[in-house]
Image: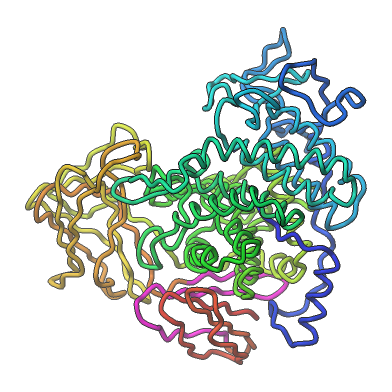
Amino acid sequence: MTNSSTTRRKRGLLAAAIAVAALTGGVGLTAPAVAAPAPLTNLAHLDFLLDTATPAEVPGHTTYRLAEEPDLVLPWTYADARDGGTFERVGGGPLDPATGDWGQGAYNADDVSRAAVVYLRHFEQTGAESSKDSAYELLRSLAYMQTADGEDAGNVVLWMQPDGELNPSAEPVELPDPSDSDESYWLARTVWAFGEGYAAFRAEDPEFASFLRDRLTLSREAIDRQSLARYGEWEVSDGKKVPAWLIVDGADASAEAVLGLAAYMQAAPDDTAARSTMRKLSEGIAAMGGGDVRSWPYGAVLPWTHSRSMWHAWGSQMPAALAEASAVLADEKLLKPALADAAVFTTTQLISDGPDNGWFPTPADKVQIAYGADSRLQSLLAVGEASGSEAFDELAAVQAAWYFGANRSGSQMYDPATGITYDGLQADGSVNRNSGAESTIHGLLSMIALDAHPEVAERALGVAGVDSRDGLRLVEAEAATSTTGEVVTPASAWTEESLYSGDTLVLDRGEKATFDLGTASTSRLVEPVLWISNEQRSTSLWKTGKLPVGLVTAKAGAQGVSPVPGVLLPQSLLLPVSGKTSQLSVSAVSGTTTLDALLVRPTVARLQLSGDGGATEIVQVSGLLPQKVKVGVAGQSSTVHVYDKTGKRVTDRTVTGTTTITIPASGFAVITR
């Protein structure tokens, strides 16, 4: 257990969009025709994870028709792989064989809420009565876990034991403790599920929908009195101004609440209180965007106000939430940071290695999970719908191909025949073949989205192999070929707000180091990742041979809400390093320079996928000027779409053989054949 906005298209709207594209010559994904894929969504494994519990009467906890329907339906948290392709359902924490209880519990509200979203979307997309029934049961269970009265009304207990007993204080301790005593991720996800639930059941079952509306209001009011009590206040995190009113100080958690509020507002547009909550949260999320193609965080919307150095793939639905909110609130300003995240950061990450769990700020956590892959996919699709640009569907196809083998392992992470999504792709390329609720849920949310976007699905299935990557890479500080400084192992890799990628190289005034970057076919942008003190200013001079390429002067800003003084951040060098030059040197001019690593990125970065459906290549320009780039393959026809840094198309060509195109500064091209 560690989320996602499939664009909520009705089948009729999808058909209408296809018809309009046919009539207007609208451009979709261009690729050699392959057979239209069968539905990818298979609910079998999620169905297997579902079980029932019959809770005793507990003050403050009840649900819809509990007296008439005393059994609750919930998904087990984990499913461990066993011999013969089978799985064993497992709870969280150690099992007490005497009581049958788990240290945490068998079921958790995070997975109950997100499983409900799976069945809701599947029902709306297919009309399957079984999915409507499962969604109904899961929403009832989630409402039971919500505290219905008292000072914590609207908050949510996270864990439940197999027999239905709530466990507000799990072991190991999770904050808040008790889990319904304050704002939380599971409060945000409860709003997500209730919002989509109300929209789905409003016409199907008005009485149940009214109940869901009341429960959503209860949780929204909890957000208003806890998080949004500080609306309009700003804090400082290592010198950067950040909003003080996000749920658990997180743009990630707040985004999942916004997804639910956006769905709800489309069905209940006159609820001004809900509209106000959504607007305030969205404003805070938008404020967390920053950087550009040359500087951290490369256009990404960061998830946590307490860290300028952290981005994680799981729960990174901030662009999706902003895209949905921009449409519901008719506010184009909210879309701007979503476009930067989708067009610049996501493109950078796709080319680098895909949805790594964490860039802290280096891609130090190389594990990849479905929650991260789905969050990126949902965001691309939502931004594409809100902006009207097909660029994001093209990128979405590349992201979705991760499930079918376009990853560092070359392994299929989702199996349409069984509905199994594996729990993770490890840094070494091995696959964690367990398949718990979170992985299953987010794999299915992706498949539901792909079934709603058949052109994207077709392309993803057709290019499920990685031919080549030339993107951002890491050169560790301790890999210096020569130095008069000292290699120091940090007491802890985790700084409380970021993560060292390895050892550090400490250079005092006058000390030097040299690094071998190798040669390349294009110039490279190099960003030294420095631990920057808030007590002293450090200055370092960077050269290739005798040519200075950057003078880096750094001192951290005020600590503020950051967990520790000082900050680990990449620093941009003024000039790129020529592809013909392999040596980069640094000398400490003043103060102490503490180097974690070098981020090295080609000014023209490339990723190519291929398979039975042809090939897709992404080319991104990271320089300050437009670049002429050679694309295409001798003797083959290619379609070339060139986009600027917002995803707006600037060129549309069909070429035979190789040709040279111009890509705008910070823009990208998608070439298909």
Name the image quarter holding the C terminus.
Answer: bottom right
What is the basis of the colouring in this image?
rainbow
Determine which quarter of the picture holds residue 114: top right
Determine which quarter of the picture holds residue 634: bottom right
Name the image quarter holding the N terminus.
Answer: top right
* Above or below: residue 129 compared with residue 547: above
Q: Residue at x 72, y 51 (%)?
A: 264
Residue 157: horizontal and vertical position, in percent? 65, 26
Residue 546: horizontal and vertical position, in percent? 12, 71
Q: Residue at x 35, y 39 (%)?
A: 561
The majority secondary structure of the magenta stretch comes to strand
Residue 607: horizontal and vertical position, in percent? 52, 69
Question: What's drawn in magenta, residue-wise?
Answer: 606-633
Residue 540: horizontal and vertical position, in percent? 15, 57
Residue 655 in the figure: left or right of residue 34? left
Q: Is residue 446 visible?
A: no
Determine which quarter of the picture holds residue 144: top right
Q: Is residue 629 magenta?
A: yes
Between 37 and 495, the one nearer to me in the picture: 495
Q: Residue furthest top?
A: 98
Residue 238 in the figure: left or right of residue 394? left
Q: Residue furthest left?
A: 510
Q: Residue at x 65, y 49 (%)?
A: 274
Q: Is residue 43 visible?
A: yes
* Above or below: residue 115 compared with residue 585: above
Report how many numbered discs are placed on residues in the image. Answer: 0
Q: Is residue 497 magenta?
A: no
